[in-house]
Amino acid sequence: MEELTREQINSFINDGLVKIENAFSTEIADECRAILWKATQCDPNNPDSWTQPVVRIGELGFEPFKKAANTLILHNAFDQLVGKDNWLPRLTLGSFPIRFPSKESANDTGWHVDASFAGENANNYFEWRINVNSKARGLLMLFLFSDVSENDAPTIIKKGSHFDVAKILEPEGEKGLSFMELAQKLNTISTKEEIFATGKAGTVYLCHPFIVHSAQNHYGTTPKFMAQPPLLTKYDFNLNKINVLLSPVEKAILQGLKM
């Protein structure tokens, strides 16, 4: 049975992420990429048709995306990181930010933490919220549907930043902070090592829900195809459980609060 090793789980707790290569097959990645190319209305063989730095594609429920999100190794990893059966299967993969080589800067770069539950205005994502229990969200996931090198606008991840975010969120209680409120506080965290989310198509990064990350401009030649969905939880995390019952996500939050 394909499972994360103890070293990988410890890396997730301490660094805030684990990289899983070959999480889904290159054949599935090829199928997904073909669907996404069609959705962009761009010609893969004509760079002149790539007129925007980012093209965002909404939810897609086609079978190849379901297959990518529901492999045995991912399901096992979800159980290991979030708690056995404490997650909802992904039937879609959220939105797809497709990044193209461009002289024009993308308008969505900037350090942030993805929000997890709706605020007063559910239609405005910037008002969605995050609290110290990571209500509703178990993981941030980065699915690579194309090969991504350091020149291909890989997501930038601040290693260990989930500890700092836990400390920022703790005083805010159940209500937490909005996406924008938290983003404005991220300049207070100490400098962290930056990791580029590179890899072959079929790679998935499973990240702690508090991890600080950013998009960047594309300086390469090959468009980048990815998805960044949340893994939603069935039950909210409980930081008051005895240690043996804590999931790695909960252990990381508590470790951050003690630092």
Image (cartoon, rainbow, N blue to C red):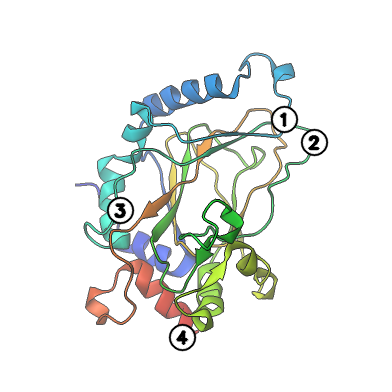
Which label lies toward us, 1 or 4? 1
**Separation (CA) of disc 1 from disc 2:** 8 Å
At horizontal 63% and vertical 19% (from top left) the residue drawn is: 42
Q: Would residue 5 appear left or right of 142 to someone viewing this image?
A: left
- Residue 30 appears in the figure: yes
**Separation (CA) of disc 3 from disc 1:** 35 Å
Is label 4 in a helix, a strand or a loop? helix
Say which label, 1 or 4, has the lower sequence index.
1
Q: Amino acid at mark 3?
A: Ala
Residue behind mark 2:
104
Residue behind mark 4:
258
Residue 52 - label: 1
Q: Position of residue 195 (x, y in %)?
A: 58, 55
Q: Would residue 33 appear left or right of 56 to someone viewing this image?
A: left
**Separation (CA) of disc 4 from disc 2:** 43 Å
**Separation (CA) of disc 3 from disc 4:** 26 Å
Q: Position of residue 25 (x, y in %)?
A: 36, 31
Q: Amino acid at mark 4?
A: Lys
At horizontal 51% and vertical 25% (from top left) the residue drawn is: 36
At horizontal 61% and vertical 64% (from top left) the residue drawn is: 193
Q: Amino acid at mark 1?
A: Gln
Residue behind mark 3:
77
Q: Looking at the picture, tell me which residue is in the foreground, 74 or 57.
A: 57
Say which label, 4 or 2, has the lower sequence index.
2
